Amino acid sequence: MTHKKVTMLQNEVWYGPSSKHGELMPHNRKTVYSVNIETNATCNQDNPLLISNMGRFIYAPRGFSLDISGGVISAVSKFGEIDFAEGFGTLRGAYLEACRRYFPPSGSSVIPPQEFFTCPQYNTWIELIYDQNEDDILKYARGIVENGLPAGILMIDDGWNDYYGSYRFSKSKFPHPREMCRTLHEMGFKVMMWISPFISPDMPEYRELAAGGMLVRRKNAQGAMPAFSKNGISVAVREWWNGWSAVLDMTNPDTVRWLDNRLSELCDLGVDGFKLDAGDACYYFEDDITYSPVTPAEHAELWNRYGLKYDYNEFRACYKCAGLPLVQRLHDKPHSWEGGVSALVPDTLAQGLLGYAYVCPDMIGGGSFADFLPNSKTFDAELLIRYCEASALMPMMQFSLAPWRVLDEEHYKVILKYAELHEEFAPRILELAHESSRTGEPIVRSLEYVFPHEGFEKITDCFMLGDDILVAPVYKKGETVRIIPLPNGIWEDECGVRYEGGQTITVDAPLDRLPRLKKVKR
């Protein structure tokens, strides 16, 4: 057991360790905050890192539990050491040193495929929920191009197979999967499939994997299946959001080879990659029995690193995989102003400061399907557009709810405008992605990161795209103006109007305008 206590300095703030808690950052002397990313990680990207605007950082290679209160940071690790370093001057200086030591970038411009950055992505979840099927997926894809949006990456979500662990198309829902993939490719789409490490019990795959010792096990509990119980040990069956399932033991090379073979069958049909969902550390326990001993967080990390086999990948939960060419989406947000669209920028800033550069905000409008059911009364056209606005100059933007279906012509034109804006900035976004692969720097950066010690340490509602483009989305209902703090220097908006930095300005922000300014030379 390792303990580390650090007292905050005057005017010091800290960021980390979970991107799910972006709205709670930065932590300061008044903060009361606790999190454990040693056993039960949150549902988004984590890194056992805390980083300070005064050039200090705390890092625990095997994770820690954290408490902040009374201006004191207390970190405890059951599994390893806790490192503390200081003297790096700024938030950027501390981040770059932590990156160099613990999560160096992949290098050589190894990034996810450019389609992730250059055009919108599309996910079938909100439109089809668990009723994924060939006819409606093709209808959705045709709706995209017929309504003026560009083809891009299409992710077919949960519900495409008959049960978890088959990793094969349901014959009733997808009678012609090869032809479907070919048609989508001809339309200009790349095809990704949702998968998880869960295996439904009482199915052929379960019996095969259990007999081969390829599932997570534990000491016998009440109701253990005697067929796969040996020496007081049986297969672990875990509850997750879709019921009860066994879990792949990713520490076992035989498990990995088995999964490779199943997924290669899908690739042979034309699938380009995978959305690797679940795998959260909370689905693994400290007393699990696996082929090789690992902590719950380390088991989650193995699921994450498995995604490196596929260029086209996406994760919603990641542990200690900073610097790798893995696409990171924010956890499903509600279709709401508070905690929904308001969380997109803070959480994305947190992702970047934890070393996850290739980030995607949540599905435009939110990823909580209950908000869009026929009897739901929560839909708000203004909110959907503000979600789209906030995503437009992020590294990636992802549609799921079909905006052409729910919006009138006037509002839908605004959606098209923001999709076109993303394509306009795609070369710059792609340039920053390549830069990140070499330097490890985030693509989306906080003002404090780029302009240290100018008083921006608590600003988390606007962001920098690189070092020179300041973006300030609207995140409150009914607002048509935006107050923007300008760092020192000369700034120019998209209309050519120039402003002297070092002041706060107010600009018009109707639904069809995303406030943004570029720093220019004098």
Image: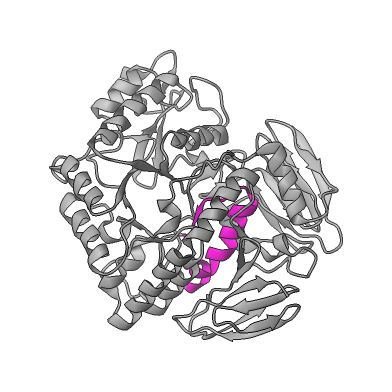
Q: Nearer the viewer, residue 363 or 515?
A: 515
Q: Which residues are magenta?
A: 337-361
Residue 375 makes an appearance in the image: no
Q: Residue at x 81, y 43 (%)?
A: 85
Q: Residue at x 31, y 18 (%)?
A: 227
Q: Position of residue 318 (x, y in %)?
A: 52, 43
Q: Residue at x 39, y 74 (%)?
A: 417
Q: Nearer the viewer, residue 75 or 17?
A: 17
Q: In the shown orientation, is residue 432 left or right of residue 145?
A: right
Q: In the shown orientation, is residue 152 left or right of residue 26?
A: left
Give above or below for 212 relative to 44: above
* Way the structure is coloured: one colour
Q: Nearer the viewer, residue 98 or 502?
A: 502
Predominant SS along the magenta part = helix
- Which quadrant is home to the C terminus? bottom right
Q: Nearer the viewer, residue 25 or 436?
A: 436
Outermost residue toward the top in this view: 231
Q: In the shown orientation, is residue 519 left or right of residue 409?
A: right
Q: In the shown orientation, is residue 492 left or right of residue 246?
A: right
Q: Position of residue 150 (x, y in %)?
A: 32, 62
